[in-house]
Image: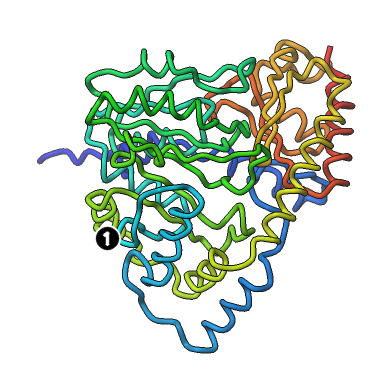
Amino acid sequence: MATLTIPKTILSQRVVELHESQTLEMAAKARSLKAQGYDVINLTLGEPDFNTPEHIKEAAKQAIDENFSFYTPVPAIMELREAIAYKLRRDNQLDVKAENVVVCTGAKQALINTILALINPGDEVIVFAPYWVSYIPMIQLAQGIPIVVEGKIENGFKVLPQDLQKAITAKTKAIIYSSPSNPTGTVYSKSELKEFAEIIASYENIYIIADEIYEYINFEDEYWSIGAFENVKNRTITVNGFSKSFAMTGWRVGYLAAPKEIADACIKIQGQFTSATCSIAQKAALAAITGDLSATQIMKNAYLRRRDLVLSLLKDTPTINTYIPQGAFYLFPDVSYYFGKSDGKSTIRNAYDLCMYLLNEAYVALVDGEGFGASNCIRISFAAADEKLIEGIRRIKEALNRLQ
């Protein structure tokens, strides 16, 4: 009689090899401590602490009252696609029409749609580091090979054109980056993007995935989209959404703008996963993108003030190697000075240990840089009220002073 062999796991290899998002992991640890009664200051998640603006909520309420509760076309209602295309032409100088726009359940789905539409097993994808934690797992899910190109802290975490050039091989299929960046707040200028475009334009089979989700949280005078350059416009997929700039994280609405062949492929993929995003959320997004941006401006000004507050609170701590973020709502300092230090109970071997030490000893939740491609760093979100930032930095500094 044949012996029945029980597999070690019933799960697919892709799931076994998939890492949990570090930001979500640390947020869960913070919630667990808080549930036990500890006063935890959570500076982990990239989530605005503002409420969704009133005119957006009113549009959703109206949609509910008008029974706009049925399936919509997979890429969204035409009115929303046209409004997004108009915005991209007006603000970003992108040569797009409604047929190039696909609305998704968050910008995260827009990214995975694009990667699955483009990447074959063995294709290389150049990833600018530090990078958002989900880029690498998404590429791996598509059986692509991530090729990390590092931006140094002394250069504001910006990748240099010559480093991009060196990373390109015959297997390179795509390049992915964010600007403003999560986790660094780096914003690439028009001239810097032009240099990248000139390099990429000479390789006809390389595509650009530009993650612009933090577009409106930009502290510089100018914002530029790489897809506006004529020499790469037909090979650029621009990803954006409503979560950050309109305080709509829970609404789950993002979008991509791509050459029609790629947009159609993303619609095909999305049709088998989720179909269209929530009809009510689409109406809310329409109100957001066609409405007054004064609430968005107020939020951006608050983030800028909070950035300066955090930098001022840390300026007398030279052991934390900081820089000035140009956008988004994160500080990503180098904390390698503390590696090897101890308070007599805990020894800090890496950034993860430091985050766990600060969580357990100071009750401040942060995210280590390993998942962002920068193991010497930690991410501090300043999307929090001033008093929480002040108290959180005070606790951090007090705990760090105990490490010798």
Q: Is residue 239 left or right of residue 169?
A: right
Q: Which quarter of the figure has residue 123?
A: top left
Badge 1: how crowded within 10 Å, few (<14), some, or many (20+)?
A: few
User: Disc 1 designates what residue?
Assistant: 272
Position above or below: 77 against 265: below
Q: Position of residue 353 (x, y in %)?
A: 68, 24
Q: Is residue 187 above or below residue 353?
A: below
- Residue for point 33% across, 49% down: 258
| Residue at left offset 70%, top offset 48% | 32
Residue at coordinates 66% horizontally, 65% vertically from top-left? Answer: 52
Return the residue found at the far bottom.
66
Whether residue 67 sits left or right of residue 359 in the image: it is: left
User: Which residue sits at x=75%, y=35%?
Assistant: 359
Look at label 1 and name its amino acid. Gln
Position of the C terminus, as image quadrant, is top right
**How far across and down, in percent of the image, does residue 363 sit?**
80, 38
**Within the image, what quadrant is residue 248 found in?**
bottom right
User: In the image, 293: left or right of 125?
Assistant: right
